[in-house]
Image: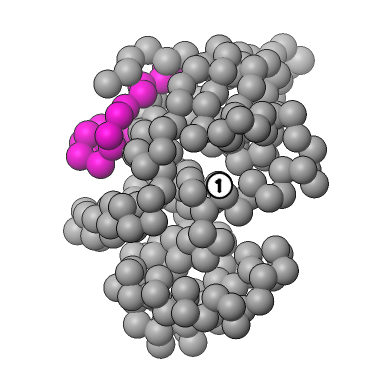
Amino acid sequence: MIKLVDISKKYCSRFNSSENLVLDEVNFTLRENEILALTGPSGCGKTTIARLILGLEKPDKGSIFYKDVDLSKLNKRQFKPYRKKIQFISQNPGSFFDPSIKLGKSIIEPLNNFKISVKSKESKIEELLDDLKLDSKILTRYPHQVSGGEIQRLSILRGLLLEPKVLVLDEVTSMLDISVQAQILSLLKEIKIKNHMSYLFISHDEEVVNLFADRIIRLDRGKIIKRI
């Protein structure tokens, strides 16, 4: 599904002109219909991998394949179709929603970006609201009027509207209390099975990773140190 081959990435230090190696020849494959977790200490390269897969940055070396297409070689225009196939859910879902706009309008923004008619997705929105255990009345509210768990579910709904094949989940439950974490993870598993999706699950929480993922990759200082 997604394959990283010899991925390396350097960043310049904030304090001098020297370059720091953040990723050092990282290789792994996210298979179809699986949950692959990336874990490791802060600064080990997890989020950099996510940004590279999402096309927000380019690797200094190596290739990132979606099936047989090398995403790292595509320009912005060429990459756009793959933004529908690979969606991102962050640990701070509130940042995806304009506080001055009702949630119903915010969740359809990705459709407008891809010139997809809202009418064609009305039944999909209803289906996702049901899948995520959300009342449709929530769409008439503003972000500050809903809970952290509800806003995270809405960010998931927003990403799923484009019917992606891959979700990149970056610390999606880290800001939620334990009971809500369990609910979100359970819903994500149900959605993955129903829609035949793959997840790249990024988390520093070893307990959550062990419960949620099919396979685990541990990183440290930009290198893969263990595969489980």
Inspect this view and state whether residue 43 appears.
no
Residue 72, relative to residue 193: is it above or below? Answer: above
Residue 120, relative to residue 227: is it above or below? Answer: below
- Give the residue displayed 52% in from the left and 53% down from the top: 164
Q: Is residue 134 left or right of residue 210?
A: right
Inspect this view and state whether residue 96 appears.
yes
Depth check, front residue: 71 or 216: 71
- The C terminus is located in which quarter? top left
Which residue corresponds to mark 1? 86
- Whether residue 157 appears in magenta in the rendering, the answer is no
Q: Would you call the spot at circle 1 few (<14 residues within 10 Å), some (14-19), or many (20 or more)? A: many
Q: Is residue 86 left or right of residue 178?
A: right
- Whether residue 210 appears in magenta in the rendering, the answer is yes
Residue 167, relative to residue 124: is it above or below? Answer: above
Q: Residue furthest front?
A: 68
- The picture quadrant where one finds residue 177 is bottom left
Residue type, mark 1 in image: Ile
- Give the residue displayed 47% in from the left and 75% down from the top: 125
Q: Position of residue 38 (x, y in %)?
A: 39, 30
Depth check, front residue: 68 or 88: 68
Range shown magenta: 203-222
Q: Is residue 13 left or right of residue 154?
A: right
Q: Secondary structure at mark 1?
A: strand
